[in-house]
Image (spheres, rainbow, N blue to C red):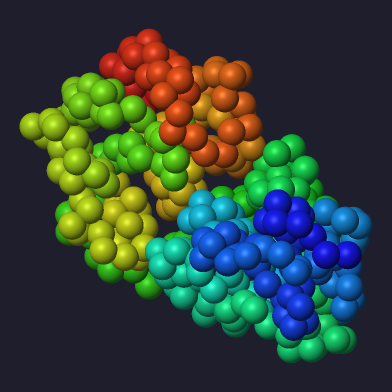
């Protein structure tokens, strides 16, 4: 059955084109390509999709697994998705993965997969013909996972493990902390480790970011608490703050700066996932999602829920009314007291 434009872009899985190619809905969306004439990949061609039919994979009997349209197009989702794959590989070292990725993924996310490829296996751009996926090997579709019901119900790491056909409880918490990041070949940051603190104030959407009006106040609170240079990625008007953007041209640089920080303060889940990988103490703020869905396995992360039920479940927004709610919530925070209690 052919899908209409909306159904194609929100399909819980990948798509099949009229030419019989597996296509990522994301690639259609970001290129403004017509989303007509597509069918859901579904369970055809022997593909597993846990959103459509739960399954259990016996990885002890497998050597290679094909992951279709995994593991998202954002940095944070991809870090957690890779953690799930490497947690599986820790239990089954003989496994290698071939991951089929949206061709138009942002460059900084592509760089993460390039860094991780030696640990994982092979990275291939979509579209591909189903026949390119060996029929005797396990094929799992995790496409468009944002629209899977379980994505809003489970901690993200458990979601990805479940989507790979394993019970999340079979993976110990210690393997859910992104420690694979420690094995990456990273550039050295331009400061001595532990000589600065990080205020990563910008997330992927304004509804999850620290309002601009609050950033200098929070930088001052960090300076008062640590008496170390305050750094971050983006301009903040404060005497003791340095913008690292010119010194972080790549994803590897971004990771390296977080790796060497004394402390991280952020609403950005990508930054906090990286910090967890290096056991960096973190204070993380949440506006639209329950903290346990993102930081349950991070013992060094103190989460702060701003308790904004009006924004629950919103993935992106820059509406004035939403930003005003967030601004009032941050204004009510006694940042100096917060740091004294959590660091």
Q: How many labels does the image show?
A: 0
In the foreground, 145 or 244: 145
Q: Left or right: 49 with respect to 330?
A: right
| 227 versus 64 height, above or below | above
- Tell me what residue is drawn at x 52 percent, y 80 percent: 118
- Tell me what residue is drawn at x 48 percent, y 43 percent: 269
* Image quarter in which the N terminus is found: bottom right
Where residue 140 sits, quadrant-wise, is bottom right
* Image quarter in which the C terminus is found: top left
Give percent across and percent down for residue 230.
20, 37
In the foreground, 310 or 259: 310
- Tell me what residue is drawn at x 59 percent, y 19 percent: 310
Asked whether residue 166 appears in the rendered view, the answer is no
Asked whether residue 54 appears in the rendered view, the answer is yes
Give percent across and percent down for residue 301.
48, 35
Where residue 133 sits, quadrant-wise, is bottom right
- Tell me what residue is drawn at x 36 percent, y 40 percent: 202
Give percent across and percent down for residue 106.
45, 64
Give percent across and percent down for residue 251.
36, 63
In the foreground, 73 or 155: 73
């Amino acid at each position: 059955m052919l899908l209409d434009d909306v159904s194609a872009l929100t399909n819980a899985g990948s798509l099949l084109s009229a030419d019989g190619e597996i296509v990522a809905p994301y690639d259609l969306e970001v290129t403004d390509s017509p989303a007509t004439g597509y069918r859901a990949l579904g369970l055809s061609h022997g593909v597993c999709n846990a959103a459509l039919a739960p399954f259990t994979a016996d990885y002890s009997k497998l050597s290679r697994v094909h992951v279709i349209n995994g593991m998202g197009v954002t940095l944070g989702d991809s870090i957690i998705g890779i953690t799930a794959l490497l947690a599986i590989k820790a239990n089954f070292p003989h496994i290698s993965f071939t991951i089929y990725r949206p061709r138009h993924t942002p460059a900084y996310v592509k760089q993460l997969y390039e860094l991780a490829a030696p640990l994982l296996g092979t990275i291939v751009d979509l579209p591909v013909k189903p026949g390119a996926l060996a029929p005797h090997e396990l094929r799992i579709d995790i496409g468009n996972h944002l629209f899977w019901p379980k994505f809003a119900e489970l901690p993200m790491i458990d979601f990805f493990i479940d989507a790979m056909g394993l019970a999340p409880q079979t993976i110990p918490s210690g393997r859910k902390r992104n420690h694979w990041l420690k094995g990456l070949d990273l550039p050295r940051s331009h400061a001595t480790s532990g000589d600065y603190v990080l205020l990563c104030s910008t997330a992927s959407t304004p509804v999850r970011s620290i309002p601009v009006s609050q950033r200098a106040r929070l930088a001052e609170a960090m300076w008062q608490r640590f008496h170390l240079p305050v750094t971050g990625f983006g301009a903040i008007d404060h005497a003791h703050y340095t913008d690292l953007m010119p010194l972080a041209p790549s994803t590897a640089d971004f990771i390296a700066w977080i790796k060497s920080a004394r402390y991280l303060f952020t609403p950005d889940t990508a930054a906090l996932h990286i910090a967890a990988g290096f056991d960096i103490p973190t204070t993380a703020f949440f506006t639209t999602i329950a903290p346990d869905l993102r930081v349950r396995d991070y013992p060094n992360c103190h989460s702060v829920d701003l308790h904004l039920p009006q924004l629950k479940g919103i993935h992106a927004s820059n509406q004035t009314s939403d930003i005003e709610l967030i601004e009032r919530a941050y204004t009510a925070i006694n940042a100096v007291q917060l740091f004294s209690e959590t660091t």
